[in-house]
Image: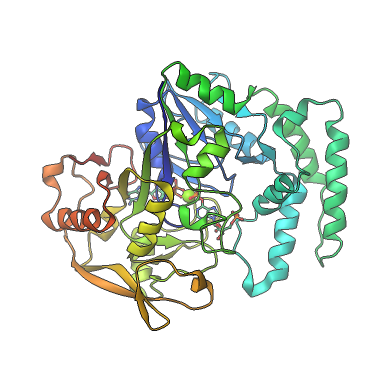
Amino acid sequence: MTQVDVLLGLQWGDEGKGKIVDVLSPQYDLIARFQGGPNAGHTLEFDGKKFVLNTIPSGIFNEKTMNLIGNGVVIDPIILKRELDNLKTAGHDPVAKGKLVIARKAHLILPTHQLLDAANEQKMGKDKIGSTLKGIGPTYMDKTGRNGLRVGDTTLPDFKERYNRLVEKHKEILSHYEFEYDLTEKEAAFFEAIEFIKNIPHVDSEHYVNGFLKEGKTVLAEGAQGTLLDVDFGSYPFVTSSNTTTAGACTGLGIAPNKVGHVYGIFKAYCTRVGGGPFPTELDDEVGETLRKVGHEFGATTGRARRCGWIDLPALKYAIMLNGVTELIMMKADVLDGFDTIYACTHYEHNGETIDYMPYDIITVKPTPVLKEIQGWKTDVTKITKTDEIPAKLAEYIAFLEQELEVPVKYLSVGPDRTQTLILD
Ligand code: GDP
Ligand code: IMO
Ligand code: MG
């Protein structure tokens, strides 16, 4: 029997998961998204084209690979339909090709979930989470509150009544906010999209994935967001509402922990965060601005400027521990090409102590990063294709990270295109 490999982000999201899942997808029979929803924006580039996927797994461009949206994902039917319409226009129609299935246990994002998200954020003012306003939090609240609607419910004769009952609850909650809204247009689009997604096969993801394993087929679970946005272990409450860690792949697909194989942890050569919350190595200066400009650090989903800073080793060590990472993937090395010196945070100064872990009170007391200076490589690495072309200083940086993190770096990404990826020995 085969096992499920997992690929997930080790920072605050946007590490480059979409690109690498696409690169790895020829090695897999199935790519399965296990959590999150259209708060995700996973970018892929190949043949001069760029695609951003929100709900659809990033294996969709590989002819041989099946793609599953797992039970742990929350689905906005309107966004899913739009994603599929866009793919069809671009000449890729995974529905017609029978390459996409959805878990019938996945929960649905209703238009009123988005309204609740927006009303809540508006009320929080400057303390807001900086949510993507896609209705993620309220949908997971209804899931755990046992109120939610699932994909499988759409085929029940009383789906509309169930929908109305939940929407009444939401309207009651919304009446406590000073928040104006008009549901009419969104509701029409929602029901049109519901009809559309009925054409995508609905499966029990637990049986579906375990069936692949039993047949000796290969499966890659694709994470969304990043470890530091995990609802249990991230910088709570500045997190998303799902488990973004390896454990989330088990509950989000229906696989037992002993079925997990390789765990690929992906990180940028520096660090970014979008939305509110602590970010110890953030650079609120022109260096941060340079990282943002060179790295095109603007949200794939919301277009918001991403906050930028140096790589944070205590945070990465924490993420590696939580996920049981077996191989690392380093992204966006090319963004540092022009720097004379770069820095890595090795420890924090916190409440008068030097620590190498993320403290509980990180929200209220900002840790001061202890930075190690590293010489830059000052070489354009975007065109290198062989490991022996890696500049010595970049190789030293990778060796330093491997020593600190105690996990090998298996892949190195030197540009957004599929081809700009090196396998390290
Ligand atoms: P994801 O959410 O983890 O899939 O990442 P995003 O797609 O939100 O953000 C990653 C961004 O970096 C996208 O715009 C990618 O096209 C781009 N990208 C990925 N890898 C590299 C790389 O090695 N170098 C550069 N310069 N850009 C990259
Ligand atoms: P991918 O998969 C980066 C952030 C939001 C906000 C917090 C909560 O592309 O890496 P939510 O909408 O989930 O309630 O927002 O989480 N966030 C992300 N940041 N990448 C993502 O996804 C994100 N998904 C959510 O900015 O701070
Ligand atoms: Mg993203």
Q: Nearer the viewer, residue 325 or 191?
A: 325
Residue 134 visible from this viewpoint: no
Q: Is residue 424 above or below residue 370?
A: above
Q: Nearer the viewer, residue 403 or 123?
A: 403
Residue 254 locus on image (x, y percent): 57, 32
Above or below, 291 relative to 299: below
Q: Position of residue 75 (x, y in %)?
A: 65, 39
234 with respect to 104 (left or right)? left
Give the image location of residue 63, x and y in percent: 42, 21
* Residue for point 40% across, 51% down: 15
For this orientation, the residue located farthest to the top is 215
Give the residue displayed 54% in from the left and 29% down from the top: 68
Residue 215, given in percent of the width and then of the height, sits at: 45, 15
Furthest residue toward bottom: 352
Q: Residue at x 24, y 57 (%)?
A: 401
- Residue at image position (57%, 45%) is 36
Q: Is residue 199 left or right of residue 43?
A: right
Image quarter hosting the N terminus: top left
Is residue 346 in view?
Answer: yes
